[in-house]
Image (cartoon, coloured by chain):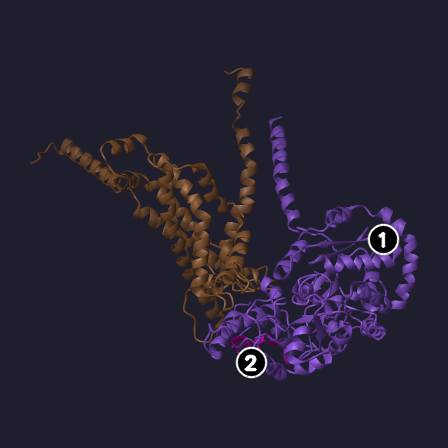
Amino acid sequence: MATAAQRRIKSVSYAKYGYIFILPFFIVYCIFSLWPLIQTFVLAFSENGTRTPAIIGLDNFKTILATPAEGDFKALGIHESFWDGIKNTAIIWVGNFVPQIALSLLLAVWFTDLRVKMPGKGFFKVVMYMPNIITAASVAGLFLSLFGDSQYSVINIMFREGEEPWKIITSCWGSRILVMFIQVWMWFGNTMIMLMSGIQGINESLFEAAEIDGANSRQTFWRITFPLLKTIMVYTLLTSMIGGLQMFDIPYMLHTGNVVNDYIKTVAVFVYEMFHGNFAKPSFGYSGAASVILFIITSILGALVFYVQRDKDAIEKKRKQKEAIKEWKRKQKGGGFSI
Amino acid sequence: MNKLKKALALVATLAIASTAFYACGNSSSTADSKAESSAAEESKEDSAEESKEESDEESEDESSEEAAGGENKVAETGDKLSILCWTGDDVEKMIENFTDANDQYKDKVQYVNVGSKGQEAREQYANYFAGGEDADLFVLEADWILDYINNDEYTAPLSDLGFTDSDFDGCYPYTVSIGTDNNGVLKAASWQATPGGYVYRTDLAEELLGAKTPDEMQEFVKDWDTFTATAKKLQEGDKKVALADTLGGMWQVWQYNRTKAWLDGDKLVIDDYCKDYAELAKEYYENGYVTKEDQWSDGWYAIGQDDSTMGYFFCTWCLGAGSMLSNAEGGEGGSTFGKYNITAGPSGWAWGGSWLALSPKCDNGEIAHDFVKYFTVDENTAKDYALFKSEFVNNPKAMKAIVDEGSNKNDLLGGQDQFSVLYEAASAIDMDGKITAYDSQIKDAFNNAVSKYAKGEIASYDDMINEFKKDAAKIEGITVE
């Protein structure tokens, strides 16, 4: 029989304070993240043209995905701008990711290489990271005045004085390449720092051993750095892919006049325009549906990356282990013989 | 005991968490005006003491009310009249002028500026109202006024302030028809009319066309055929000068040539007008009759100083100090400062405009009434304001008086009186039944397609119309066939 004092001591549990302290986070998370997330899915199945939409089922997905009938301009407009958005997003993302990772990798290797004695490493790292600090709005403004269509933009003053000005911002590939360039310029510093931390995580003795064995830089890179950098590369690929699919700010702002340039209109811009463009009658349904489709595409691509990049050796090892155990068990049970 | 502790802790955490909402609620109405700080707090304050203070003023107001005819149904319980606007330029001057003339209202009028334009402003307004804050009056822009005046949640009839429809007989009819909602109730009144004309370089006109006065110049731009012929003539000379500024500017004028609204019911109307404009825009763009700059870009202003363009299509609010014309001249001391004159141009048009609407939550009936009356109904005070801000006010009689006096001299126009030119144009504007709530979006879609067609990105007119239809069809609420 426990005394009253013992009972009291037993009941003192400090766990609940922990729960109380983390409660604010969960409350804020539920209201500002979880609820909007659920709401997006609900809206994807809801009607358009009202601020208090009712659920209508799969119609929004049908409009966006299915090929519309000839002459149905509404469905045609939405269907085409969504797929144009997907196309633009994919083109711009690939065109930005490949040069970005190549450049970042090269710089990361140079900055971490023991043999490269580069003065002012810290300075360069800061300078290369710098574009990432500038807000996208300023970057868009900067590039508009550098590469604008106007005869008074920097590039046209420098190269096209007295001639027909170059129209980079409104041209199809000009604007796309410009956005790719901006994305590379803004993000290569970030990626570089990430890759550098990955390289620095590799055991130094491996590089030393390679050096002693007479490996040249290329061999060191392809045989040591690159294979051991795989995990961080997968991470970079994944974050960049998710970020790339949601690319919004630069494509949205890189235009003059009232209308966003069609050739760089990404899916995120489409989502934004559908619910934002019409104040009195917003198309929440199409926006929601496009977001959900984008979510599914992201999930599939993410899973694909993990599948391709899975550690085949480890899987093989596990399989063999299992087989060995089975074999051993069979032997034990049957007391049989092996050839 | 434990339960009490639990409850206390929960209350504490909730209190902390709720600060997050507090911050959010406020930031939704990001306002940058100096008046902003007090707007929310003061409206919440108990108004018992103020009503005492104002009781003596009310006696004065009653007389004006009687003159107006109707009965002011709006309570007078608030402290200050607050006016929600999307740009402080106008409202700041209006308040200054209003309080100078009405001493009793000194420090009783303030404005809340959402500081953005177009769609952005439209949304900021929605946020502001959703936040439950009370502006008494608010300024609406021509492009999105219909959203608000057709929604009784946002706007109350002006008759609530004691106005009758006949009070606004002195205004330009087109401003009254825009301020009237679908049920024929007057919801908003404008203090300005915004007719536009063709503003041209006097030195270039004399050198290239031999036109010495605005009247002579008008002969070269009197209608669209002549305008095109003159543009062609300019391109044939050694000095290739565009006659008009940008496609955007041309559109501002051309859209007033429409004979019908963009929508018939909820159906998009595509008529000959669309084809005429598209072909004209293509001709102008390809031949250099307009410059290849974009409206509102830096280049738009730069062409005003380097002989790229003969002139601009500008309206009343483009002609004041610090406005578009001033930018195009390079400001005071700029290379073309004062070298412009205005003439009526090929066809009459107006551009935008702002309306004052009454919030159903208004709690400053007296001041609101006097404020609206001061700027829209009363001929004399409207005239004062016109001279005070060099603004084209919404009162033909007041404008006529100013024109007759000949006292207005605009330095940007080399001393010319722009009112005498625009006075005629304003009366000719007829917008009855020609605007719809979707105009700004339809116009964006149409102009995007036309500009691609003019630049050669879209090969044929039919493709252009297809593109336009697909774009316009995305707007919820209209149908396209």
Q: Is residue A118 above or below residue A8?
A: below
Percent x, y for residue B215? 73, 80
Other residues around mark 2 within 10 Å, as few (<14) / some (14–19) / many (≥20): few
Q: CA distance from mark 2 to mark 1?
A: 60 Å
In the drawing, what numbered circle is on residue B106?
A: 1
* Dot placed on the residue nearer the N-terminal end, 2 or 1: 1
Q: For this rendering, which residue is in front, A3 or A242? A: A242
Q: Is residue B273 magenta?
A: yes
What segment is highlighted magenta in the picture? B258-286
Type of amino acid under label 1: Lys
Mark identifier at residue A171: none
> Is A244 left or right of A31, judged from the image as shown?
left
Residues tagged by mark 2 and mark 1 found on one chain of the structure: yes
Q: Residue at x 92, y 59 (%)?
A: B60
Q: Give residue A59's position: percent from left, percent from top.
A: 47, 64
State the image quarter where residue B325 is shown.
bottom right
Task: Name the kind of residue labelled 2 in the image.
Answer: Glu
Question: What is the display colour for chain A?
Answer: brown
B262 left or right of B60 in image: left
| In the depicted structure, whether residue B93 falls above or below residue B458 | above
Q: Position of residue B442 (x, y in %)?
A: 58, 71
A92 drawn magenta: no
Depth check: A221 or B478 in front? A221
| Chain B as rendered: colour | purple
Q: Chain of mark 1?
A: B
Q: Which residue is mark 2?
A: B236
Asked which quadrant contains residue B298, the reply is: bottom right
